[in-house]
Image: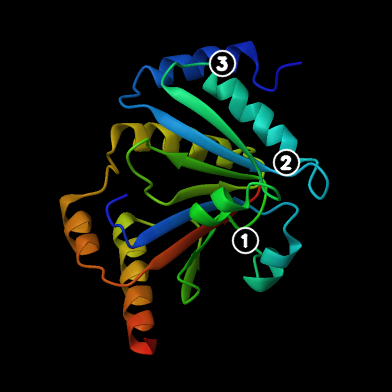
Amino acid sequence: MALISEEVAQQLKQEFEGLKDPVRLAVFSQTIADPGSEQVKRLVEELAALDDRLTLESFNFVTDSERVQALGIQRTPAIAVLRPDKDYGVRLYGMPNGYEFGSLIDAILMVSRGESGLSEETRTALAAIETPVHVQVFSTPT
Amino acid sequence: MESDKISADSVEVTGYGDLVRKYRISGVPKTVVGDVTEFVGAGPEAMLLQHVQKAAASSSLIA
């Protein structure tokens, strides 16, 4: 049974018409310590099937350690939303339920367009940042 | 996206008890910036920027 209903799939297809450049969705899961992470892989697979510009790349957190390190993946399940030419450092962890699901779709659209939607003022201020800053937004399904 | 120095994670915390404890998450959404500053609830863009600048400034003090 599909994880994404037909109705939601149609809505998403419409939203994905706004995609510009291709997006790679790198999903990290592990079957033994985290069987739930396999569900995320299935979900992203269904998402990627909705538009030709979306590609799923599936990795095992335990055995694909080179990719885990290269992309800085800290836990499973993880989704890295990437352009073929650029990694903005956007990651989603945990099952994309509720609020997170919207965040995932937004992330895909933004990365595809290469536009953050932030104000000119903010963008200028951010360009001046010289040290690494890691932002984490924690949420729950409800 | 606007800075190569900034990375961002969106974390659904169900199942990550260690994170709930580490960051004392009781209300969501909770945004933690650079392990230095944090806020709960939605916030305007300018406010998030301030947190990012604060985190950047404090890590350059340590370094």
Percent from the top left, x then y, of residue A5?
Answer: 65, 16
Q: Which residue is mark 1?
A: B27
Percent from the top left, x then y, of residue A12?
Answer: 49, 19
User: Residue visible at 24% across and 61% down?
Assistant: A126
Q: Are marks 1 and 2 on the same chain?
A: no
Badge 3 amino acid: Ala
Give the distance between the C-alpha atoms of the residues marked 1 and 2, in whole angstroms: 25 Å
Give the structural element (helix, strand or loop) at label 2: helix
Badge 1 amino acid: Gly
Q: Which residue is mark 2?
A: A37
User: Residue visible at 55% across and 48% down?
Assistant: A67
Chain ID, mark 3: A
Vertical position of residue A138 compared to residue A24: above or below: below
Give the distance between the C-alpha atoms of the residues marked 1 and 3, in whole angstroms: 31 Å
Chain ID, mark 1: B
Q: Which residue is mark 3?
A: A9
